[in-house]
Image: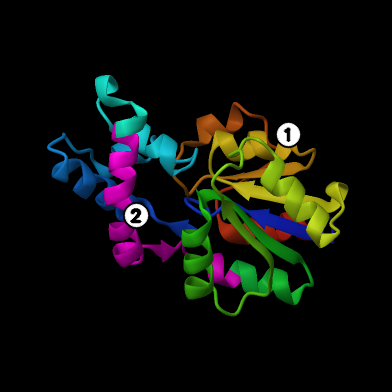
């Protein structure tokens, strides 16, 4: 195999989470008497962690720590209860993970979603995948494109950077991979357009999950 290890982004890459994320933020905004957004709007608001999502969802004049934390306090219990209502794996992802595992690839998840949610969603949707690491953002830790989370996974798993591939759906993911000194594969089925990915010059672009297996095989 050309790549012995594959690290995946979560939202927009493995799982289509946009409806549950958007609905959870919208219900918080409604409770605060504020305008809501469409699911298409939320495709551009996610990707840099939930605190940035909350900030982007507020009217500009209310993007203060006080209001961001108000949204957080309303979002979190709702998302914990409803975060799997509409979320589903993208077509072909379970088969891809099965094929990669069978081929002996070391698999991991590095997400900007808060860690508790990542650790709840991954075993629920991919219970048979032998993950080497499943990591989300923890309070006080830098979010992607800072490479800290990827560097920690590589170190803990004894991975080699030259044989590690990072897979994600946004410019944040491509920058994260390159900041960590590893190859990047952008996927076009997620939340952001192909043009955004191309602008970051990833080593690979994949239109379908099965293409990732061929990239890994080399």
Q: Is residue 85 magenta?
A: yes
In front here: 32 or 87?
32
Identify the main secondary structure in magenta: helix
Count the numbered circles shown.
2
Outermost left residue:
33
Percent position of residue 144, x then y: 60, 39
In this rendered view, identify the residue nearer to me: 99 or 10.
Answer: 10
> Which quadrant, please, contains the N terminus?
bottom right
Task: From this view, report whether residue 118 is shown above or below residue 50.
Answer: below
Residue 212 versus residue 36 in the image, above or below = below
Mark 2 = which residue?
76
Of 56 and 138, which appears nearest the observer? 138
Helix, strand, or loop for circle 2? helix
Mark 1, residue position: 179
Q: Position of residue 55 (x, y in %)?
A: 36, 32
Query: Most extreme residue toward the top, as rendered?
Result: 61
Relative to residue 34, is residue 69 drawn left or right? right
Specify the segment rendered in magenta: 67-95
């Amino acid at each position: 195999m050309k790549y012995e290890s594959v690290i995946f982004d979560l939202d927009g890459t493995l799982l289509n989470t946009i409806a549950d994320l958007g609905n959870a933020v919208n219900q918080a905004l409604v409770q605060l008497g504020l305008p809501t957004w469409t699911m298409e709007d939320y495709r551009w608001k996610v990707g840099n962690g939930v605190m940035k999502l909350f900030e982007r969802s507020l009217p500009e004049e209310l993007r203060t720590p006080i209001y961001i934390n108000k949204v957080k306090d309303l979002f979190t219990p709702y998302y914990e209860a409803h975060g799997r209502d509409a979320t589903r794996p993208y077509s072909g992802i379970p088969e891809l993970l099965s094929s990669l595992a069978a081929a002996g690839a070391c698999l991991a998840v590095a997400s900007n979603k808060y860690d508790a949610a990542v650790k709840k969603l991954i075993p629920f949707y991919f219970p048979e995948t032998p993950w080497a690491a499943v990591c989300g953002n923890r309070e006080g830790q830098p979010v992607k494109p800072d490479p800290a989370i990827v560097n920690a996974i590589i170190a803990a798993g004894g991975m080699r950077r030259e044989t590690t591939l990072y897979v994600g759906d946004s410019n944040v993911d491509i920058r994260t991979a390159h900041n960590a000194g590893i190859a990047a594969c952008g996927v076009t089925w997620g939340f952001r357009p192909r043009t955004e990915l191309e602008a970051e010059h990833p080593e690979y672009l994949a239109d379908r999950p099965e293409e990732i297996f061929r990239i890994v095989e080399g």
